[in-house]
Amino acid sequence: MLEKIHLYHTNDLHSHFENWPAIVQFLKNKKKLHEQNKEQMLLVDIGDHADRFHPITEATQGKANVTLLNMLQYDAVTIGNNEGITFSHDDLNSLYDEANFSIIISNLYTELGERPPWVIPYQIVTLNNGVKLAILGVTVFYEKFYELLGWKIKDPFQSLLETVNQVKEQVDIIILLSHLGISDDEIIAREFPDIDIIIGGHTHHVLPNGEMINHTLVAGAGKYGQYVGHISLTINNKQKMLVDRKASIYPMNEQKEICQETEAWLQHKLVDSESKLSEVVGVLLDDLSLDWFNESSLPLLLVRAIREWCDGEVAMVNSGMLLEPLSKGPVTKKDLHRICPHPINPCKVDLKGDVLKEVIIQAREEKMEHLKLKGLGFRGKVMGRMVFDGIEVKSEKLADGKQHVTDVLVHGKSIDHHRVYSVATVDMFTLGPLYPEISHAEKKIFYMPELLRDLLAWKLGENTPSL
């Protein structure tokens, strides 16, 4: 006898709650339908559900996201890098205190090499027909970042090898929740034949009908709640064997119904969250201006704060990191969250003078200043002009009509191409695509869990008289 099991999945919501009421209603309708048809349904999330760019997530340290998952009765989740490395150690350690679902991550440990009490490496689910199904979970291997926050992250491939060997003789089907990205998912499908289904996230890939690699189905449902993924499993009950699996995705912009109760809950929570973020962190005596493509006062305040916080010799940051200017008067946490929503940390790198100059020349190119960046933690619109503290850039308009860097001064002296400079900047630049020279730097120091807006709050508070 053949029986169908329905597995629904979400991933990389990044706190884009505008789609959540549609997701809720869609899944409620599906659950009701499958109950009527006496079909079993499972619901999982693949991580990065919580993103501190949203005031609700920021004000509740992600706990509102857990409440939303509880309300939909999720069966299991894994975590993404937004849960794992944008919250402090204590906030992550308490994030799932009220969770009514399993948090499955086999490659996350405490500093002592133990699994946190809120984590399990796998879950074995006995379906109504007696078939046993193992759900595994792994998250992306950002070793240095986790270490700085007091965690140990293990290589996910090694962790998977151990976990698959633990469960494969106990179960009939193995499903992996993978917040590693599509490239790693495809490698796993080739190297781990015991895994039947890989549901992925992190790289926001959209696989409308999944991808079959050997005998493994790889699935992914994009980002921001634009899609809900669905996998139907056809099982031979007598042989306890998976005989077919099919993936599909449902676009949420085509859903005509939304859950009004969820919409009202989110509206109420937004008001409450904005109230919590109303704490005054400083008072400005003058306006701080913002111009993404010319020098302005607010980016200069930020770059100065980064240099001082990291104790750098010089500092650099792009103006597009700030989304709005600040007006004179009281400045609140809500203001700083609005103008600097990114989950980006300060860092310090050692760069030789010739490398630093090359980075500065790249940064001052028009195409870089106007780059509309997506990803790397950036939640802004455009990169904008790079501003500096301790560095003066001299440029000249040449025959092509463009400004070209002619000289770089460090504290008033021409840059020494052979000298190593301690450069305070942002971790986004160490990740590779924008400035490979920075990513290749041998010495990098990351400052966590403080985000850029925390540095702004510190700098404003430092310069504000006692209230």
Image (spheres, rainbow, N blue to C red):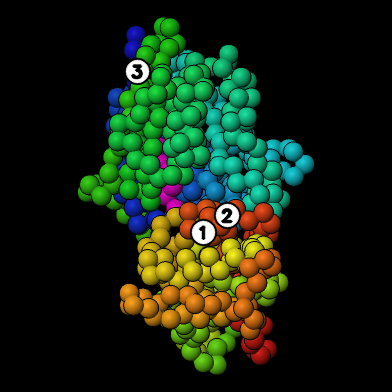
Residue 304 showing in the rendered view: no
| 353 or 456: nearer the viewer | 353
Tell me if 14 is positioned left or right of 399 in this view. Answer: right
Which amino acid type corresponds to the residue marked 1 in the rendered image? Tyr
Tell me if 192 is positioned left or right of 351 in this view. Answer: left
Tell me if 451 is positioned left or right of 405 in this view. Answer: right
Gap in angstroms between the C-alphas marked 3 and 1: 45 Å
- Residue farthest along the right direction in this orientation: 112
Residue, x 55% and y 93% (percent of image)? 285
Numbered range of the magenta stretch: 6-14
Residue, x 49% and y 15% (percent of image)? 172
Q: Position of residue 308 (x, y in %)?
A: 67, 75
Q: Position of residue 40 (x, y in %)?
A: 39, 25
Q: Quadrant of residue 385?
A: bottom left
Image height check: is 348 above or below 257? below
Gap in angstroms between the C-alphas marked 3 and 2: 44 Å
Which amino acid type corresponds to the residue marked 2 in the rendered image? Ser
Residue that numbered label 3 is attached to: 244
| 375 or 415: nearer the viewer | 415
